[in-house]
Image: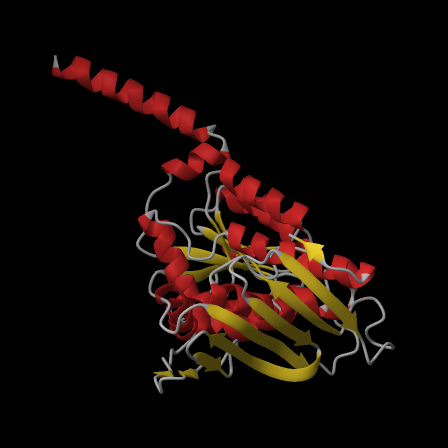
Amino acid sequence: MEKKQRRLFLKQAGAMAATTAFLPNSLWSATRQQKDKLGVALVGLGYYSTDLLAPALQLTKNCELKGIVTGSPEKIPVWKKKYGIADKNIYNYGNFDDIANNPDIDVIYIVLPPSMHAEYTIRAANTGKHVWCEKPMAPSVEECEKMIKACKDNKVKLAIGYRCQHDPNIQAYMQVAKERTFGKVMMVTSAAGYFDGRTDHWKQKKALGGGVMGDMGVYAIQGARLATGEEPISVLAQTYTVRPDIYHEVEETAMFQLEFPSGARAACHTSFGINMNYLKINYEKGWVYMEPHSSYNGNKGVRSDGVEINFPIESQQAKQMDEDAASIINGTNMLVPGEEGLRDIRVVEAVYKSAAKDCLVKL
């Protein structure tokens, strides 16, 4: 009897192994072994990966840097030496899809120019790995929707790299709106910009998803959306440049007004030619002022009742990735899912439409 049961077990186990070997990625992702610490592969080794994400991954508890994807072979020895990345976890854009067969990598983080976000998010989802994508999510609403669908179809999680939503300082003013501490929100002024002295960068090229709205503009949009806790219903916008020799394909500066269902209004400003980083929220009975509002080095503010908003954190990026990894491990919802990135791009598209036609655009 024992021999018969053993033969039956081996037969069933063999059948299961044969089946899982040919599982589609959407099913394979559901059967993979759960880990305490997730392996992350960074796709694109530019400034943000090199100076911010890779160092931040050294501070995380729930994930770790395990792989890289690069089209620059000369960078590989540097990353191998600094982070001890194994040869088998190093990819280029040609063999990118082979990550599907690598158990060391659980999350693929897309850190490429925005024009490449949709392609590589979809390809990453098709490998059966979870996906984190830098902001802006993509240049168009259509691409964002395809990215969300690809991740859902493959049963993997998608998070957008909005580090600020993981920042307790940002969460503090969001709570003011939820609790109506000072009554209804009446007016928001939201500004995000810096002076960019570069003359030949992807942010200045339309084909690569450049333009200030996708890069800094989403911070201004987020400030207004998060401050009110609502989605805008109309947009009135203007875009311009004072350096047409550099910004001849895309806008350098944008100003836009948002209207919200409650009647709240927002005046938003964003630029590659002006240094500005603040958020002012006026309520019925008080105000909150944040400056800086979207800085890498920490955000802070003060309320009209004298309460300071100042929660220092060691690394926004580390907190973001740790919390996103915890969501994957625990099977909970992402704090900033793909749908959140999509909401911003709807506004970005409306800003462009309003500026081009010089009219109010309803959302």
Taking depth in this image into account, of 247 and 3 the one nearest to the observer is 247
Taking depth in this image into account, of 306 and 100 the one nearest to the observer is 306
Residue, far left: 1
Please state the horizontal and vertical placement of residue 14, each as a whole percent of the image.
34, 23
**In the image, what residue occupies the spot 44% across and 68% down?**
184
Please state the horizontal and vertical placement of residue 217, each as a whole percent of the image.
64, 68
Is 140 placed above or below 278 here?
above
Q: Quadrant of residue 77?
A: bottom right
Side of 259 where 108 appears, left or right:
left
Count of number-bearing discs: 0
**In the image, what residue occupies the spot 83% across and 76% down?**
246
Q: What coloring was used for the rendering? A: secondary structure
Please state the horizontal and vertical placement of residue 49, each as a whole percent of the image.
55, 68
Residue 163 appears anywhere in the view? no
**In the image, what residue occupies the spot 45% across and 79% down?**
288
Residue 177 appears anywhere in the view? yes
**In the image, what residue occupies the spot 56% across and 40% down?**
149
Is 139 placed above or below 299 here?
above
Q: Quadrant of the N terminus?
A: top left
Taking depth in this image into account, of 230 and 300 the one nearest to the observer is 230
Residue, far right: 245
Please state the horizontal and vertical placement of residue 67, each as a whole percent of the image.
50, 58
Q: Quadrant of residue 126?
A: top right
